[in-house]
Image: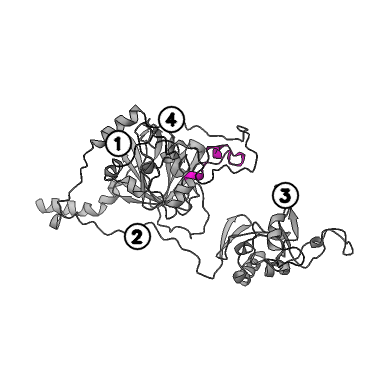
Amino acid sequence: MRRLLLFAVLMMLPCQAAFAQMDLMGVWRPLPRNQDGSGMTGDVAGVPVSDAARWRVESWSPEDFDVTEWACRPHAWDYSLEGPLSALRIWADIDQATQKVIAFHGHLNQQEQETTIWMDGRPHPPANALHTWSGFSTGEWDGDVLVVTTTHLKEAYLRRSGLMHSEQAAIRTRYRRMGDYLQTTSIVYDPVMMTEPYIRSTMMWVLDPALPMSPYPCEEATETAIPRGTVPHFLPGKSPLPGLDKDLTDRFGTPYEPRLGGAATMYPEYIVKMKTMPKPRGQGAGGRAALAALAAVVLIVPVYTQGRGGQAPARAARPDWPPKLEAPAPGEVEILPVQGNVYMLAGAGGNITVQVADQGVLMVDTGTAAMSDKVIKTVQSLAKGKPLRYIINTSHRDDYTGGNDKLAPIGEIVPFREPDYTAGPQGAIDTHRASVVSTLAVLNRMSAPTGAQAARAEVAWPDNTFTTPWKRLYFNDEP
């Protein structure tokens, strides 16, 4: 009998991981929580920010939220998951033949963000693939915890005070259900904005099947007098944000240096250094009491006694993380579909946009001169015999206009004047090249007055310029 029982136990061991998987599906109501203690606006203490992230914070303006063009720009999924009190719905796609979960889907009513977590083992897309507010996510079970890896996120807020993660960030989120409660913990890996991984935890959700999921409509509204096209910002050292003011402090009496953030400010031993820092002149009675309490803090450093020699216990080797995304080989041009008949070409300097339809081909920028021949072959493979009609230059820089010299002459523009018409725009008469469109400033930087040395050969110059805030071009039945 004892042998039979042992056999039954051994047979169940391989199934332990499957039994440990939790049902995350349902509607989850957020529970109130205290604020995260992120300090005054501009304060990034406790965050392992890089110099780039700190400069981003110092240049950020609260008027960023009032920009008309961004009135309905959502926060990224990871922010909506961590920041506001947002209801969450989770459901699954299930393969009927095997009853395996192919993917989980999530919906947050805060700004109606949605995500898909693929559970079928598919790889992440190439590094230059489309970046979105939700990114691309894959999941795997670690016991009863769903571990989600997210890449391909757009640059977005970590805090609504200028602290951002970059488009190169990779985020690992752990979903854990405890009875009728759900919590997530995320680790942000960002080679641009962070010098070390940044760990965050969310509030708790409670399962509430009867909770209605409210919609989140949005429309543009005039809330401030910021002119369209304005980019709110502060120059270095000019930010009026209180967290960046050396003469102010918060109710805890936090000195100025820790408020600048950095990896060192995450660790308990930094408290010793804080005790030696000068007290801010704007400190009130509450700040003095907080610093007095800080002076009494006794650090408790953990001592590992497990394992040999008092060392920390050994841990099983894990694969490298964050995942290494596939990038185009050096010297090659990568085609990435955007939507419909629009493509992005990567690997030729600045990214190139290509639109292909019945009227022909339109390009936004042409890449570097060294990659011109490969760009031409790539565009021709998409064009299927359609002529190149327009090139739009967004900058004068060589990695955006270097291909003008070779690409413009292979195109042709449909003339809107008779061949003997000499009073109109000359670029519209010459049918044996694509029309190169840009602002007048781009032309001025590429050309030069008569007798002076131009930065670029005349064949690369734009021939269709404008000085208005924008230019509307109708082509391929699209404005």
Q: Which residues are magenta?
A: 57-74
Image quadrant in which you'd find residue 332: bottom right
Q: Is residue 310 left or right of residue 204?
A: left
Amino acid tagged 2: Asp
Amino acid tagged 1: Gly
**Marking on residue 138:** none
Given contact means CB atoms under 8 Å apart, are the residues at marks 4 and 2 in contact?
no
Residue 62 among magenta residues: yes
- Residue identifier under label 3: 472
Give the colour scheme of this rendering.
one colour
Image quadrant in which you'd find residue 345: bottom right
Q: Is residue 379 above or below residue 245?
A: below
- Residue identifier under label 4: 211
> Could you say whether the residue bearing mark 4 is in a helix, strand or loop?
loop
Given contact means CB atoms under 8 Å apart, are the residues at marks 3 and 4 in contact?
no
Given contact means CB atoms under 8 Å apart, are the residues at marks 1 and 4 in contact?
no
Pointer 4 local density, CA inside 10 Å: few below 14, some 14–19, many at least 20: some
Q: Could you tell me what secondary structure mostly forms the magenta stretch?
A: helix
Amino acid tagged 4: Leu
